[in-house]
Image: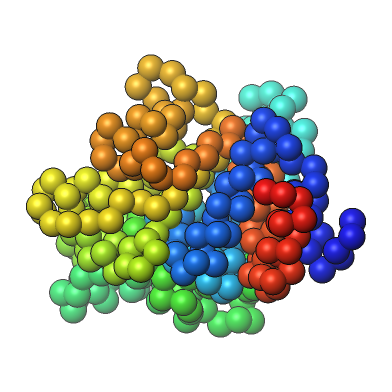
């Protein structure tokens, strides 16, 4: 390495030449050129990325102004909070591939909920957070107030006494997003642990379902957020995984165009990291070209597909981008040196 101030960026430029590594390099450089030119970037995050501690790089990227909005599953939203308050109680299971049903039954009896090679502690995470958020819901029911799902978590994570932190707050993306007041959508939040807990309190008449704004209201609000974010150089779309976390927000462009009959800028960049292969009707494995037919992307949109594990690729990309953000002149000189 010749430039120790930008080691990750130089590693990527020097070594990533072909196949998925080239896609990673090219997507990173296109991302950098977009934000350096004043563009913004919207992230869609599926999978168990918060449990996998993606916040280690995601939180600094939010603080550095590399991420300007998020669409996340309800699970990723709450699991970022869990990692902050219950980090020491998590257990890892690197040998999970060799587990039997009896092994997983033992994990259940330990009141742990396994997510691949790690596990969320029920008492220290679910039940501890429940004590704080349920009163917020019951008070909202009494006061007849309504909020988006993420707004309850934005308030809660900023109210928690730092003495209760077990994880590093600098590595909590939810805390970084709340402090930055980042626009967030949480489509299908019902499909999460706290979505289920909320439903149980609705069933017992302790909470009114209407205190949480609906997914339709999320989209109605997102029309305005998108128009704000897409001013100037426009906003790109960076997607981890597939499913509703990605499909919900990317649809905002054709919906504004066809359903509201209003002018709208297309997404100005697209990158998806997924290990899903293209198959019949698969959204996660659909190629970007398919999105052209839905008027979500255009033939001129820079498009990248990285068929890999996001827990490997994203930290590399974000660290390279953070280096570039901290020293743009050196980054551009390095990019020119390697001729890309």
Find residue 261 and report its horizontal and vertical position in percent.
10, 52
Name the foreground residue: 330 vs 43: 330
Find residue 10 and report its horizontal and vertical position in percent.
79, 55
Identified at 46% across, 77% down, the residue is: 180
Q: Quadrant of the N terminus?
A: bottom right
Image-based side of 93 in relation to 58, left or right: right
Identified at 21% across, 70% down, the residue is: 146
**Figure check: 268 above or below 160:** above
Image-based side of 191 in relation to 29, left or right: left
Image-based side of 109 in relation to 18, left or right: left
- Quarter-of-image position of residue 295: top left
- Quarter-of-image position of residue 40: bottom left
Find residue 76 and report its horizontal and vertical position in percent.
49, 53
- In the picture as drawn, the residue positioned furthest to the top comes out as 280
Image-based side of 100 in relation to 133, left or right: right
Name the foreground residue: 251 vs 151: 251
- In the picture as drawn, the residue positioned furthest to the right comes out as 1
Identified at 71% across, 57% down, the residue is: 336
Identified at 53% across, 71% down, the residue is: 65
**Figure check: 291 above or below 72:** above
Q: How is this picture coloured?
A: rainbow
Find residue 278 and report its horizontal and vertical position in percent.
47, 22
Disc tally is 0
- Quarter-of-image position of residue 309: top right
| Residue 63 seen | yes
Name the foreground residue: 112 vs 235: 235
**Figure check: 286 above or below 40:** above
| Residue 184 seen | no
């Amino acid at each position: 390495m010749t430039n120790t101030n930008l080691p990750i960026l130089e590693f990527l430029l020097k070594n990533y030449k072909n196949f998925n590594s080239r896609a990673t390099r090219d997507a990173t450089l296109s991302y950098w050129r977009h934000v350096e030119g004043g563009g913004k970037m919207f992230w869609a995050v599926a999978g168990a990325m918060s449990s996998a501690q993606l916040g280690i790089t995601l939180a600094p990227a939010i603080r550095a102004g590399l991420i300007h909005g998020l669409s996340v599953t309800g699970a990723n939203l709450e699991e970022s909070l869990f990692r902050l308050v219950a980090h020491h109680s998590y257990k890892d299971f690197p040998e999970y591939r060799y587990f039997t049903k009896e092994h997983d039954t033992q994990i259940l009896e330990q009141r742990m909920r396994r997510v691949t090679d790690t596990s969320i502690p029920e008492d220290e995470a679910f039940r501890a957070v429940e004590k704080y958020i349920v009163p917020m819901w019951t008070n909202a029911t009494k006061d007849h107030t309504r909020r988006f799902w993420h707004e309850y978590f934005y308030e809660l994570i900023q109210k928690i006494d730092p003495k209760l932190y077990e994880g590093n707050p600098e590595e909590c993306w939810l805390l970084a997003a709340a402090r930055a007041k980042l626009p967030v959508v949480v489509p299908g939040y019902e499909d999460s642990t706290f979505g289920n807990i909320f439903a149980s309190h609705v069933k017992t008449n302790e909470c009114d379902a209407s205190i949480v704004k609906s997914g339709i209201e999320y989209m109605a609000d997102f029309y305005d957020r998108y128009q704000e974010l897409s001013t100037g150089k426009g906003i790109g779309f960076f997607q981890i995984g597939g499913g509703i976390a990605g499909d919900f927000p990317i649809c905002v462009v054709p919906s504004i165009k066809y359903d509201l009959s209003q002018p709208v800028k297309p997404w100005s960049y697209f990158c998806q990291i997924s290990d899903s292969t293209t198959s019949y009707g698969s959204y996660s494995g659909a190629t970007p070209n398919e999105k052209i037919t839905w008027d979500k992307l255009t033939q001129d949109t820079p498009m990248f597909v990285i068929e890999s594990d996001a827990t490997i690729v994203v930290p590399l990309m974000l660290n390279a981008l953070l280096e570039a953000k901290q020293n743009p002149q050196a980054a551009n000189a390095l990019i020119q040196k390697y001729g890309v």
